[in-house]
Image (spheres, helix red, strand yellow):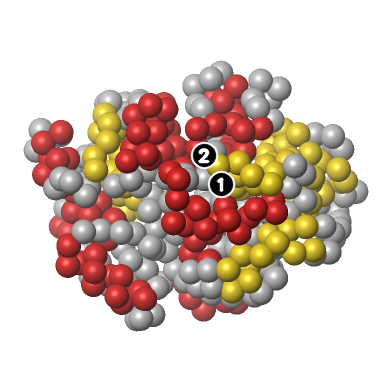
Amino acid sequence: MRAATWAGVDEVSVETVPDPAILNDRDVILKVSRTTTCGSDLHLLGGYVPAMRAGDVLGHEFMGEVVEVGPGVRDRRVGDRVVVNSFIACGNCWYCRQELYSLCDNGNPNPGITEGLWGQSPGGCFGYSHAMGGFAGSHAEYVRVPYADVGSFVVPEEVGDDRALFASDAVSTGWMGADLAGTKPGDTVAVWGAGGVGQMAARAAMLLGAEQVVVIDRLTERLEQVRRHVGAEVVDYSTTDVMAELRERTGGRGPDVCIEAVGMEAHSTGVQGVYDQVKQQLRLQTDRPSAVREAIMACRKGGSVFVLGVFAGPVDKFPLGAAMNKGLTLRGAQVHGQRYMPRILGHMARGELTTEHLATHVMPLEDAPRGYRMFKDKEDGCVRAVFLPHG
Protein backbone atom coordinates (compact mmCIF):
# COMPACT_ATOMS: atom_id res chain seq x y z
CA MET A 1 0.00 0.00 0.00
CA ARG A 2 1.01 3.66 -0.33
CA ALA A 3 1.86 5.73 2.75
CA ALA A 4 3.43 9.06 3.68
CA THR A 5 6.58 8.41 5.68
CA TRP A 6 9.20 10.33 7.65
CA ALA A 7 12.30 10.54 5.48
CA GLY A 8 14.46 12.69 7.76
CA VAL A 9 14.34 16.15 9.29
CA ASP A 10 11.85 18.27 7.33
CA GLU A 11 11.40 15.50 4.77
CA VAL A 12 8.19 13.59 3.92
CA SER A 13 8.10 10.88 1.27
CA VAL A 14 5.28 8.79 -0.23
CA GLU A 15 6.40 5.17 -0.43
CA THR A 16 5.08 1.65 -0.84
CA VAL A 17 5.00 -0.08 2.57
CA PRO A 18 3.68 -3.48 3.74
CA ASP A 19 -0.07 -3.81 4.26
CA PRO A 20 -1.13 -3.90 7.92
CA ALA A 21 -2.38 -7.16 9.41
CA ILE A 22 -4.31 -8.23 12.50
CA LEU A 23 -1.69 -8.85 15.23
CA ASN A 24 -3.89 -9.09 18.33
CA ASP A 25 -7.43 -10.29 18.93
CA ARG A 26 -8.73 -6.79 19.63
CA ASP A 27 -7.39 -5.20 16.41
CA VAL A 28 -9.30 -4.01 13.38
CA ILE A 29 -7.96 -2.98 9.98
CA LEU A 30 -9.32 0.34 8.77
CA LYS A 31 -9.53 1.59 5.19
CA VAL A 32 -8.57 5.23 5.73
CA SER A 33 -10.94 7.72 4.10
CA ARG A 34 -9.61 10.95 5.67
CA THR A 35 -6.40 11.77 7.55
CA THR A 36 -5.02 15.19 8.43
CA THR A 37 -1.85 16.93 9.46
CA CYS A 38 -1.59 18.16 13.04
CA GLY A 39 0.58 20.84 14.57
CA SER A 40 2.35 18.26 16.71
CA ASP A 41 3.50 16.50 13.51
CA LEU A 42 5.72 19.50 12.84
CA HIS A 43 7.73 18.67 15.96
CA LEU A 44 8.47 15.28 14.40
CA LEU A 45 9.50 16.84 11.12
CA GLY A 46 11.73 19.34 12.91
CA GLY A 47 13.59 16.58 14.73
CA TYR A 48 12.47 17.68 18.21
CA VAL A 49 10.78 14.40 19.17
CA PRO A 50 13.17 11.47 19.69
CA ALA A 51 13.10 8.01 18.16
CA MET A 52 11.83 8.69 14.64
CA ARG A 53 13.21 6.38 11.96
CA ALA A 54 13.27 6.77 8.21
CA GLY A 55 10.26 4.96 6.76
CA ASP A 56 7.97 5.49 9.77
CA VAL A 57 4.42 6.16 8.60
CA LEU A 58 3.14 9.55 9.78
CA GLY A 59 -0.35 10.62 10.87
CA HIS A 60 -2.53 10.23 13.95
CA GLU A 61 -5.82 12.01 13.19
CA PHE A 62 -8.08 9.94 10.95
CA MET A 63 -11.29 8.09 10.16
CA GLY A 64 -12.40 5.36 7.77
CA GLU A 65 -14.22 2.08 7.19
CA VAL A 66 -13.63 -1.15 9.09
CA VAL A 67 -12.58 -3.87 6.61
CA GLU A 68 -11.32 -6.62 8.95
CA VAL A 69 -11.88 -7.43 12.63
CA GLY A 70 -9.95 -9.54 15.10
CA PRO A 71 -11.66 -12.44 16.90
CA GLY A 72 -11.76 -10.54 20.21
CA VAL A 73 -13.52 -7.44 18.85
CA ARG A 74 -17.07 -7.16 20.22
CA ASP A 75 -18.55 -3.84 19.14
CA ARG A 76 -17.15 -3.13 15.67
CA ARG A 77 -18.26 -4.75 12.41
CA VAL A 78 -16.95 -4.81 8.87
CA GLY A 79 -18.46 -1.81 7.11
CA ASP A 80 -18.66 0.46 10.18
CA ARG A 81 -17.71 4.08 9.49
CA VAL A 82 -15.59 5.08 12.47
CA VAL A 83 -13.39 7.87 13.74
CA VAL A 84 -10.36 6.80 15.80
CA ASN A 85 -8.71 8.60 18.67
CA SER A 86 -5.04 9.34 18.19
CA PHE A 87 -3.96 7.74 21.49
CA ILE A 88 -4.08 3.98 21.96
CA ALA A 89 -5.61 2.70 25.21
CA CYS A 90 -6.57 -0.76 26.43
CA GLY A 91 -9.67 0.26 28.41
CA ASN A 92 -8.83 -2.13 31.27
CA CYS A 93 -5.83 -0.80 33.21
CA TRP A 94 -6.06 1.47 36.25
CA TYR A 95 -5.52 4.64 34.21
CA CYS A 96 -8.16 3.72 31.65
CA ARG A 97 -10.64 3.01 34.44
CA GLN A 98 -10.00 6.57 35.69
CA GLU A 99 -10.67 7.84 32.13
CA LEU A 100 -7.03 8.92 31.80
CA TYR A 101 -6.74 7.11 28.51
CA SER A 102 -3.56 8.71 27.15
CA LEU A 103 -1.76 7.40 30.26
CA CYS A 104 -2.72 3.77 29.55
CA ASP A 105 -0.25 1.25 30.99
CA ASN A 106 -0.67 -1.09 28.02
CA GLY A 107 -0.88 1.26 25.04
CA ASN A 108 2.86 1.81 24.58
CA PRO A 109 4.98 -1.30 23.95
CA ASN A 110 8.21 0.78 24.13
CA PRO A 111 7.95 2.45 27.55
CA GLY A 112 11.66 2.64 28.28
CA ILE A 113 12.35 5.72 26.16
CA THR A 114 9.74 7.94 27.78
CA GLU A 115 10.39 6.52 31.24
CA GLY A 116 13.92 7.84 30.86
CA LEU A 117 12.66 11.23 29.70
CA TRP A 118 9.70 11.75 32.03
CA GLY A 119 9.92 9.19 34.83
CA GLN A 120 6.91 7.21 33.56
CA SER A 121 5.51 6.34 30.16
CA PRO A 122 2.24 7.58 28.64
CA GLY A 123 0.23 5.42 26.28
CA GLY A 124 0.95 4.86 22.61
CA CYS A 125 0.08 7.13 19.71
CA PHE A 126 -0.36 6.42 16.02
CA GLY A 127 2.51 7.61 13.84
CA TYR A 128 4.35 9.44 16.63
CA SER A 129 7.81 7.91 16.93
CA HIS A 130 9.07 4.77 18.59
CA ALA A 131 9.06 6.61 21.91
CA MET A 132 5.26 6.53 21.69
CA GLY A 133 5.02 2.87 20.67
CA GLY A 134 6.30 2.76 17.10
CA PHE A 135 2.80 2.35 15.65
CA ALA A 136 2.30 2.93 11.95
CA GLY A 137 0.38 6.12 11.35
CA SER A 138 -2.75 6.99 9.43
CA HIS A 139 -1.30 8.69 6.33
CA ALA A 140 -1.79 5.43 4.48
CA GLU A 141 -4.40 3.49 2.58
CA TYR A 142 -4.96 1.14 5.52
CA VAL A 143 -4.04 1.18 9.22
CA ARG A 144 -4.15 -1.32 12.09
CA VAL A 145 -6.20 -0.06 15.04
CA PRO A 146 -5.40 -1.81 18.36
CA TYR A 147 -8.08 -2.03 21.09
CA ALA A 148 -10.66 -1.02 18.50
CA ASP A 149 -13.64 -1.37 20.84
CA VAL A 150 -12.08 1.31 23.06
CA GLY A 151 -10.56 3.76 20.61
CA SER A 152 -12.86 3.78 17.58
CA PHE A 153 -16.32 5.35 17.49
CA VAL A 154 -19.12 4.82 14.98
CA VAL A 155 -19.94 8.09 13.24
CA PRO A 156 -23.64 9.11 13.28
CA GLU A 157 -25.27 9.20 9.85
CA GLU A 158 -25.91 12.94 10.22
CA VAL A 159 -22.17 13.70 10.50
CA GLY A 160 -20.16 13.91 7.28
CA ASP A 161 -16.58 12.73 6.95
CA ASP A 162 -15.14 16.25 6.81
CA ARG A 163 -16.69 17.00 10.19
CA ALA A 164 -16.14 13.65 11.90
CA LEU A 165 -12.44 13.57 11.00
CA PHE A 166 -11.53 16.26 13.50
CA ALA A 167 -13.17 14.47 16.43
CA SER A 168 -10.13 12.19 16.26
CA ASP A 169 -7.76 14.70 17.83
CA ALA A 170 -8.30 18.44 17.28
CA VAL A 171 -11.75 18.57 18.89
CA SER A 172 -11.14 15.97 21.57
CA THR A 173 -7.86 17.63 22.59
CA GLY A 174 -9.43 21.07 22.69
CA TRP A 175 -12.45 19.81 24.60
CA MET A 176 -10.25 18.10 27.15
CA GLY A 177 -8.34 21.33 27.77
CA ALA A 178 -11.48 23.35 28.34
CA ASP A 179 -12.98 20.66 30.58
CA LEU A 180 -9.95 19.73 32.71
CA ALA A 181 -9.06 23.40 33.13
CA GLY A 182 -12.34 23.66 35.01
CA THR A 183 -14.23 25.98 32.65
CA LYS A 184 -17.52 27.06 34.28
CA PRO A 185 -20.52 29.10 33.17
CA GLY A 186 -19.65 32.78 33.31
CA ASP A 187 -15.86 32.30 33.01
CA THR A 188 -13.52 34.26 30.80
CA VAL A 189 -11.26 31.87 28.88
CA ALA A 190 -8.15 32.87 26.93
CA VAL A 191 -6.66 30.46 24.38
CA TRP A 192 -3.15 30.84 22.97
CA GLY A 193 -3.05 29.51 19.40
CA ALA A 194 -5.68 29.59 16.64
CA GLY A 195 -4.82 26.33 14.93
CA GLY A 196 -7.26 23.43 14.93
CA VAL A 197 -6.78 22.56 18.61
CA GLY A 198 -6.94 26.17 19.80
CA GLN A 199 -10.10 26.86 17.82
CA MET A 200 -11.75 23.75 19.19
CA ALA A 201 -10.68 24.54 22.76
CA ALA A 202 -12.39 27.91 22.32
CA ARG A 203 -15.57 26.33 20.93
CA ALA A 204 -15.62 23.76 23.72
CA ALA A 205 -15.28 26.52 26.33
CA MET A 206 -18.28 28.27 24.80
CA LEU A 207 -20.35 25.07 24.85
CA LEU A 208 -19.34 24.58 28.50
CA GLY A 209 -20.82 27.98 29.32
CA ALA A 210 -17.92 30.44 29.24
CA GLU A 211 -19.18 34.01 28.99
CA GLN A 212 -16.16 35.40 27.17
CA VAL A 213 -13.62 33.48 25.06
CA VAL A 214 -10.56 35.18 23.56
CA VAL A 215 -8.16 33.51 21.10
CA ILE A 216 -4.62 34.85 20.67
CA ASP A 217 -2.60 34.39 17.46
CA ARG A 218 -0.85 36.42 14.75
CA LEU A 219 -2.10 34.80 11.53
CA THR A 220 -4.92 36.82 9.97
CA GLU A 221 -6.65 33.91 8.25
CA ARG A 222 -6.79 31.85 11.45
CA LEU A 223 -8.12 34.74 13.49
CA GLU A 224 -10.79 35.26 10.82
CA GLN A 225 -11.79 31.59 11.14
CA VAL A 226 -12.18 32.10 14.89
CA ARG A 227 -14.50 35.06 14.32
CA ARG A 228 -16.55 33.45 11.57
CA HIS A 229 -16.77 29.78 12.56
CA VAL A 230 -16.12 29.66 16.31
CA GLY A 231 -17.69 32.95 17.39
CA ALA A 232 -14.97 33.88 19.86
CA GLU A 233 -13.12 37.17 20.28
CA VAL A 234 -9.56 37.50 18.93
CA VAL A 235 -6.29 39.25 19.79
CA ASP A 236 -3.41 39.64 17.32
CA TYR A 237 -0.35 39.46 19.55
CA SER A 238 1.87 41.01 16.85
CA THR A 239 -0.04 44.30 17.03
CA THR A 240 -0.97 44.69 20.70
CA ASP A 241 0.16 44.04 24.27
CA VAL A 242 -1.60 40.77 25.12
CA MET A 243 -1.30 41.21 28.88
CA ALA A 244 -2.80 44.70 28.80
CA GLU A 245 -5.53 43.64 26.37
CA LEU A 246 -6.64 40.72 28.54
CA ARG A 247 -6.64 42.87 31.67
CA GLU A 248 -8.79 45.46 29.94
CA ARG A 249 -11.28 42.84 28.74
CA THR A 250 -11.62 41.36 32.24
CA GLY A 251 -11.97 44.47 34.37
CA GLY A 252 -8.33 44.31 35.43
CA ARG A 253 -8.50 40.81 36.89
CA GLY A 254 -7.27 38.55 34.07
CA PRO A 255 -8.84 35.41 32.54
CA ASP A 256 -10.23 32.70 34.82
CA VAL A 257 -8.88 29.98 32.52
CA CYS A 258 -5.85 30.15 30.24
CA ILE A 259 -5.29 27.38 27.67
CA GLU A 260 -1.97 27.02 25.85
CA ALA A 261 -2.53 25.34 22.44
CA VAL A 262 0.75 26.14 20.71
CA GLY A 263 3.47 23.78 21.92
CA MET A 264 7.22 23.58 21.74
CA GLU A 265 7.72 25.77 18.65
CA ALA A 266 5.85 28.85 19.82
CA HIS A 267 6.60 32.17 18.16
CA SER A 268 6.79 35.39 20.17
CA THR A 269 7.90 38.96 19.77
CA GLY A 270 10.77 40.72 21.48
CA VAL A 271 14.08 39.61 22.92
CA GLN A 272 12.65 36.58 24.72
CA GLY A 273 11.33 35.14 21.45
CA VAL A 274 14.72 35.49 19.78
CA TYR A 275 16.41 33.95 22.82
CA ASP A 276 14.14 30.89 22.74
CA GLN A 277 14.49 30.38 19.00
CA VAL A 278 18.29 30.59 19.05
CA LYS A 279 18.55 28.11 21.92
CA GLN A 280 16.21 25.67 20.17
CA GLN A 281 17.99 25.90 16.82
CA LEU A 282 21.33 25.27 18.57
CA ARG A 283 19.70 22.27 20.32
CA LEU A 284 20.43 23.82 23.71
CA GLN A 285 16.74 23.27 24.48
CA THR A 286 14.00 21.29 22.75
CA ASP A 287 11.10 23.60 23.56
CA ARG A 288 10.13 27.26 23.13
CA PRO A 289 7.70 27.92 26.02
CA SER A 290 6.83 31.56 25.36
CA ALA A 291 3.06 30.95 25.16
CA VAL A 292 3.10 29.00 28.43
CA ARG A 293 4.99 31.81 30.16
CA GLU A 294 2.51 34.38 28.93
CA ALA A 295 -0.51 32.28 29.93
CA ILE A 296 0.82 31.95 33.48
CA MET A 297 1.54 35.66 33.75
CA ALA A 298 -1.85 36.64 32.28
CA CYS A 299 -4.05 34.30 34.33
CA ARG A 300 -5.94 35.82 37.25
CA LYS A 301 -4.95 34.94 40.81
CA GLY A 302 -6.38 31.57 41.74
CA GLY A 303 -7.09 30.75 38.09
CA SER A 304 -6.30 27.72 35.97
CA VAL A 305 -3.70 27.16 33.24
CA PHE A 306 -3.89 24.12 30.97
CA VAL A 307 -1.08 23.11 28.61
CA LEU A 308 -2.40 21.42 25.46
CA GLY A 309 0.58 22.01 23.19
CA VAL A 310 3.14 19.20 22.94
CA PHE A 311 6.39 19.62 24.90
CA ALA A 312 9.27 17.18 25.17
CA GLY A 313 11.84 18.32 27.72
CA PRO A 314 12.89 20.91 30.30
CA VAL A 315 12.08 24.53 29.50
CA ASP A 316 14.04 27.66 30.30
CA LYS A 317 12.83 30.62 32.38
CA PHE A 318 9.66 28.91 33.54
CA PRO A 319 7.76 31.36 35.82
CA LEU A 320 7.33 28.98 38.74
CA GLY A 321 7.27 31.84 41.21
CA ALA A 322 4.25 33.38 39.46
CA ALA A 323 2.42 30.05 39.37
CA MET A 324 3.01 29.45 43.08
CA ASN A 325 2.44 32.96 44.42
CA LYS A 326 -0.68 33.54 42.32
CA GLY A 327 -2.17 30.25 43.52
CA LEU A 328 -2.63 28.88 40.00
CA THR A 329 -3.77 25.39 39.09
CA LEU A 330 -1.43 24.16 36.34
CA ARG A 331 -2.32 21.02 34.37
CA GLY A 332 -1.46 19.37 31.09
CA ALA A 333 -2.13 16.11 29.24
CA GLN A 334 -2.09 14.28 26.00
CA VAL A 335 -5.62 13.69 24.81
CA HIS A 336 -7.98 11.44 26.79
CA GLY A 337 -10.14 11.34 23.69
CA GLN A 338 -12.11 8.19 24.47
CA ARG A 339 -13.59 10.16 27.37
CA TYR A 340 -15.00 12.91 25.14
CA MET A 341 -15.63 11.59 21.65
CA PRO A 342 -19.20 10.28 22.14
CA ARG A 343 -20.26 13.70 23.46
CA ILE A 344 -18.39 15.47 20.67
CA LEU A 345 -20.08 13.38 17.97
CA GLY A 346 -23.42 14.25 19.54
CA HIS A 347 -22.67 17.98 19.33
CA MET A 348 -21.57 17.48 15.73
CA ALA A 349 -24.78 15.62 14.86
CA ARG A 350 -26.86 18.49 16.28
CA GLY A 351 -24.89 21.10 14.34
CA GLU A 352 -23.51 22.70 17.51
CA LEU A 353 -19.90 21.96 16.61
CA THR A 354 -18.64 22.31 13.05
CA THR A 355 -15.11 21.69 11.82
CA GLU A 356 -15.23 21.56 8.03
CA HIS A 357 -13.57 24.97 7.82
CA LEU A 358 -10.36 23.55 9.29
CA ALA A 359 -9.78 21.47 6.14
CA THR A 360 -8.42 24.37 4.11
CA HIS A 361 -6.47 22.14 1.72
CA VAL A 362 -7.72 18.70 0.63
CA MET A 363 -5.52 16.59 -1.61
CA PRO A 364 -4.62 13.02 -2.56
CA LEU A 365 -2.13 11.15 -0.38
CA GLU A 366 0.46 11.39 -3.16
CA ASP A 367 0.63 15.13 -2.49
CA ALA A 368 1.52 14.69 1.20
CA PRO A 369 5.02 16.23 0.83
CA ARG A 370 3.46 19.37 -0.66
CA GLY A 371 0.71 19.36 1.97
CA TYR A 372 3.20 19.22 4.82
CA ARG A 373 5.26 22.00 3.28
CA MET A 374 2.18 24.21 2.95
CA PHE A 375 1.12 23.36 6.51
CA LYS A 376 4.51 24.07 8.03
CA ASP A 377 5.09 27.32 6.14
CA LYS A 378 1.44 28.46 6.46
CA GLU A 379 1.30 28.85 2.68
CA ASP A 380 -1.97 29.97 1.11
CA GLY A 381 -3.62 30.22 4.54
CA CYS A 382 -3.19 26.50 5.22
CA VAL A 383 -4.71 25.57 8.59
CA ARG A 384 -4.88 21.82 7.97
CA ALA A 385 -3.93 19.65 4.99
CA VAL A 386 -6.31 16.69 4.64
CA PHE A 387 -5.19 13.65 2.65
CA LEU A 388 -7.50 11.26 0.77
CA PRO A 389 -5.68 7.91 0.55
CA HIS A 390 -8.18 6.48 -1.93
CA GLY A 391 -8.77 9.54 -4.10
Residue sitting farthest toward the right: 71
Q: Note whether residue 279 is visible.
A: yes
Q: Which mark is residue 123?
A: none
Q: Position of residue 293 (x, y in %)?
A: 24, 59
Kind of element beneath mark 2: loop
User: Counting other residues with Cα less than 10 Å from the Cα at mark 1, is it few (<14), some (14-19), or many (20 or more)?
Assistant: many
Q: Earlier in the sequence, mark 2 or mark 1?
A: 2
Q: Which labelled disc corresponds to residue 385?
A: 1
- Is 359 on the left-hand or right-hand side of 324? right
The reply to whether residue 327 is in sight is no
| Residues at circles 2 and 1 in contact by the CB criterion of under 8 Å | yes
Q: Residue at x 39, y 58 (%)?
A: 263
Tell me: 127 left or right of 209: right
Q: Residue at x 56, y 63 (%)?
A: 122
Q: CA distance from mark 2 to mark 1?
A: 7 Å
Viewport quadrant of the N terminus: bottom right
Q: Is residue 33 left or right of residue 354?
A: right
Identify the residue position indicated by label 2 in the image.
360
